[in-house]
Image (cartoon, grey):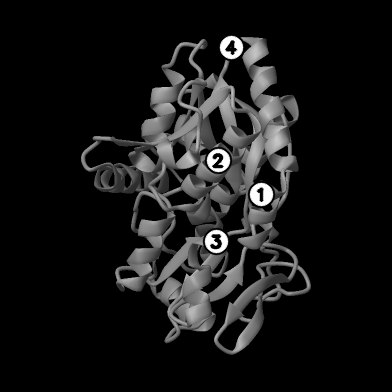
Amino acid sequence: MKKLIALVLALVLALSLVACGGGAASSEAAGGETGGNPNGETIKIICGYGVGGTADLIARKYAVVANRLYPEYNFIVENMTGGDGFAAATYFADLDASAKELLVFGYGLCYRHDLGKEYGTEIVEFDRDAMYPIGTVDDRTWILYTTPDQTLESILEKAKAGTLKMSGGNPLSDCHLELGSLCALMGGNVMVVPYDGGAAQKQGLVNGEVDVFMGTTQAAMEEVEAGTLIPILAFNDRAFEGFVTPEGPITVPTVAGDAKAPELDPSIDFSSCILPAGGSLAVRAGADQAFIDAMTEVTKAVWADAEYHEWIESVMLNRFELYGDEAVAFYDEACAKAVAAFDNLSA
């Protein structure tokens, strides 16, 4: 076990340098397109992932709707990439509690935080307790995509041969924990090639740099419809519908439940490979209660607005709302599941 953790640590550190460009974070502000009132109180939404990825698009849609509903504010999105969310989290954890900023606070970030703190799998320079989730804005089902010349059977064979390469976050991201633990239970493994953001991760598959891409439903809808990429597995326990291919609508097999993919060993329970995915908006812990209450009110109003929840539905994300202390408890439960998935991976 200690040898395995040491190997994981070395891999994570090496690949994180690739993802971070040697540790330098890039920052891009993008506020004008959100339609905010320049005379309103500016609220930054810090997104630690690249422009065009699902987290980025959700943050921008949230800002557009929030600005329309609350013209007294000017919500803007700032992308602060590096380390697959670590750069933004480190920045945010160092903020003064009075800062009028929000963080796109993903579950995968917390998984890597807890594993790094407990097992030393990577250097973690922030405390996740420095973030207080005010409300869920993103609940997703991870989909395993590949190219039309491959199948789930051929992908599993590559995993057993030790040659499978995936994109979808850094090592020990939620995507890696899910697919990696599944492959481990099947007697194989997977190598993670890191990119910042879903758009770059998908492009890695399109360019042939990896064999599979673990992404959101939104990320590859157009490619599936065009027939250039195919969804072969949903990390869910119920049939996943909504994708349309050139041949028509399809149902994507799952890792568990009645729609479990027949290529998976029927004697193995893969439900431990399903982790909560997505995340919330968070304030800096210790923020003024009036600010927390105001931002929670905004988040509830954004969800209630058709422009937001109908868009969420249109890209096959899930309507799922938790606020405040309930969201905190959900994060803790999700992290416990991630540790269990890591145990599968370690075995």
Looking at this view, is 282 or 265 the one in front? 282
Q: Residues within 10 Å of mark 4 (few under 14, many from 20)?
A: few
Q: CA distance from mark 1 to mark 2?
A: 9 Å
Outermost left residue: 22
Q: Are marks 1 and 2 in contact (CB under 8 Å)?
A: yes
Q: Earlier in the sequence, mark 3 or mark 1?
A: 3
Q: Which residue is mark 2?
A: 64
Observer-side mark, 3 or 2, equals 2
The tag on residue 73 is none
Which residue sits at x=42%, y=63%?
A: 190
Q: Is residue 32 above or below residue 165?
A: above
Residue at image position (42%, 87%) is 149
Q: Which mark is residue 307?
A: 1
Closer to the N terminus: mark 4 or mark 3? 3
Label 4 to label 3: alpha-carbon separation: 34 Å
* Residue pointed to by mark 4: 286
Q: Tell me whether circle 3 and circle 2 mark residues in contact (CB < 8 Å).
A: no
Q: CA separation, marks 3 and 1?
A: 16 Å
Say whether residue 324 is left or right of residue 131: right
